[in-house]
Image: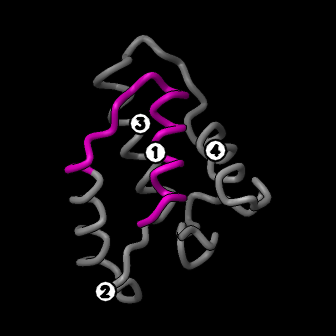
Amino acid sequence: MGLDFLDTVFRCEREFGIKLNRDEIGNLFKEVREKSWFSMGTHDLCVRDFVALVEANIRLQNPASDYEVFERIRTIIGDCLAVEESDVKLESWLVQDLGMD
């Protein structure tokens, strides 16, 4: 993943007051590559998996929060990638569907 992904990660960290562990992100990419028939050799993530990672970190690092996580991440991804928020769905792939670099 490139600068678009890093921008998304940094914005999510700031938005939710958390720190995403880079090893966890790397492991998530590895799991997706192992499970997904189309992403062999590519770095792509489903929005659903990224949202789950952020939600898990919010529960650990900021448990008193009450966020609309997907809605906020949808806005962040839309801003970072200059795509319509309505195009950002849980089943969307960041690279293949949304054009993330």
Residue nearest the observer in this picture, 68 or 24: 24
Residue for badge 3 = 55
How much space separates mark 3 and mark 1, taking CA atoms?
Answer: 13 Å
Work out whether mark 2 precedes mark 1 in sequence or the reverse, and give the earlier one: 1
How much space separates mark 4 and mark 3, taking CA atoms?
Answer: 15 Å
Circle 3 residues within 10 Å: few <14, some 14–19, many ≥20: some
Residue 64's image quarter? top left
How much space separates mark 2 and mark 1, taking CA atoms?
Answer: 22 Å
Work out whether mark 4 precedes mark 3 in sequence or the reverse, and give the earlier one: 3
Work out whether mark 3 precedes mark 1 in sequence or the reverse, and give the earlier one: 1
Give me the residue at 69% from left, 44% from top.
75
Give me the residue at 24% from left, 67% from top.
31
Mark 3 and mark 2 residues within 8 Å of each other at the beta carbon? no
Determine whether the residue tagged by mark 4 lies in a helix, strand or loop.
Answer: helix
38 versus 4 height, above or below:
below
Give the left or right position of residue 71, taking residue 95 as reference: right
Residue for badge 2 = 41
Give me the residue at 54% from left, 38% from top.
11
Q: Amino acid at mark 2?
A: Gly
In the rendered structure, find residue 76 and report the number of the disc placed on it.
Answer: 4
Work out whether mark 4 precedes mark 2 in sequence or the reverse, and give the earlier one: 2
Q: Amino acid at mark 3?
A: Glu
